[in-house]
Image (tube, rainbow, N blue to C red):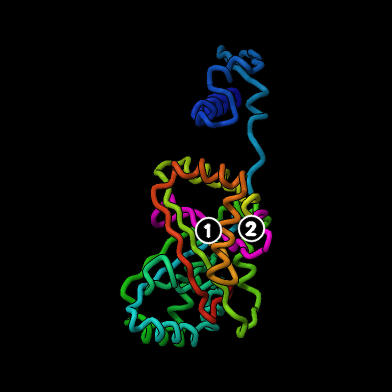
Amino acid sequence: AEELSHIIITMRSLRRLTNLSASSSLTTPTSFYKSCSWNNTNAGGVTLLSSSRLMTTTSSPPPSPKGFYELRRYKIPPAKRAEYIKLCEESSQLRKKLTQNGFCGFYVPEVGSELNTVTHVYHYEDYDHRDKVRSDMRKNEEWQNFLRKSLGMVEEQTSEVYIEAAVATKSAGLHVNSFKEKASKDEDSNASSSIFEIRTYTLQLGYNPIPKMQNLYAEGLPSKIASDTEKLSELVWIGYADVGDLNKFVEIWKYPSYQSHIKVREAARTADAWRETIGKIAPMVTHFNTTLCSAAPFSPVK
């Protein structure tokens, strides 16, 4: 049984290696087999081939995302937007309590998107955690009262789940879930709100574009950040879609003003490594949108 298991494992390992993309750092399947140092052993009449290459081709695992982020977008009639945001402000502390400090942000578009659509961002440890939060909300009479007042103003709702692109955020010096951790800290409610840019890339279909996008970003992002010598920008978070419209890659950046985001963009064009990264990314992108938002006064990250 052990010998048969070894055969199966070896065959599976070889199959995975032969299915690697041509862009892999490994050699092609034919040259791979030739370059291995093979040892023949006999087990029950079956010749087994083993190689040390099989044990040395795996790289260290990337940073592991913990939990996920849910981006909820609500479309509000223009005439009702201010009233809706006011109701959300009145219930903001209850929202933080019921989501167990998973409420991360509340952003209102100003330029570049449908102006009557607001974006809520939440973090959950897993789907069981989300179920528990949603159940607590249904049982809370104060929250249900908020829904009775506000849902009549909502024309459409969308929800998407994102996994943090930890390889990319790590390259920028952020640790996993720094967005959620920052949201958990109490900020001065009277502090002036910054400008947030939500950049959304829609990539080609397939398994490879998202991992490739992360790795390319990790290569070029440090040069983009270094080009911002005035330190006008702050990377808040990067994630990729896991439920909803897939093959989407989203960045959230923070700036002190609208004009500062133009200065940062112009500086990034002088970063050679970043320009190379964009050149490699562009062929994979089928749609790209950038939206400038203001953070609501009660947004945990603002």
Q: Which residue is mark 1?
A: 251
> What kind of element bears circle 2?
loop
**Could you say which disc has been placed on residue 6 in the image?**
none
Along the viewing direction, whichever of 197 and 92 lies nearer the viewer = 197
Badge 1 density bin: few <14, some 14–19, many ≥20, Cα 10 Å: some
The percent position of residue 7, horizontal first and vertical second, equals 56, 23
Q: Which residue is mark 2?
A: 176
The percent position of residue 244, horizontal first and vertical second, equals 40, 57
Residue at point 36%, 85% (across, down): 148
Question: Up-down: is 45 above or below 165?
Answer: above
The percent position of residue 70, horizontal first and vertical second, equals 48, 64
Mark 2 or mark 1, which has the lower sequence index? Answer: 2
Side (left or right) of 250 relative to 225:
left
The percent position of residue 268, horizontal first and vertical second, equals 59, 53
Along the viewing direction, whichever of 225 and 235 lies nearer the viewer = 225
Q: Which residues are magenta?
A: 226-250
| Residue 7 shows up from this direction | no
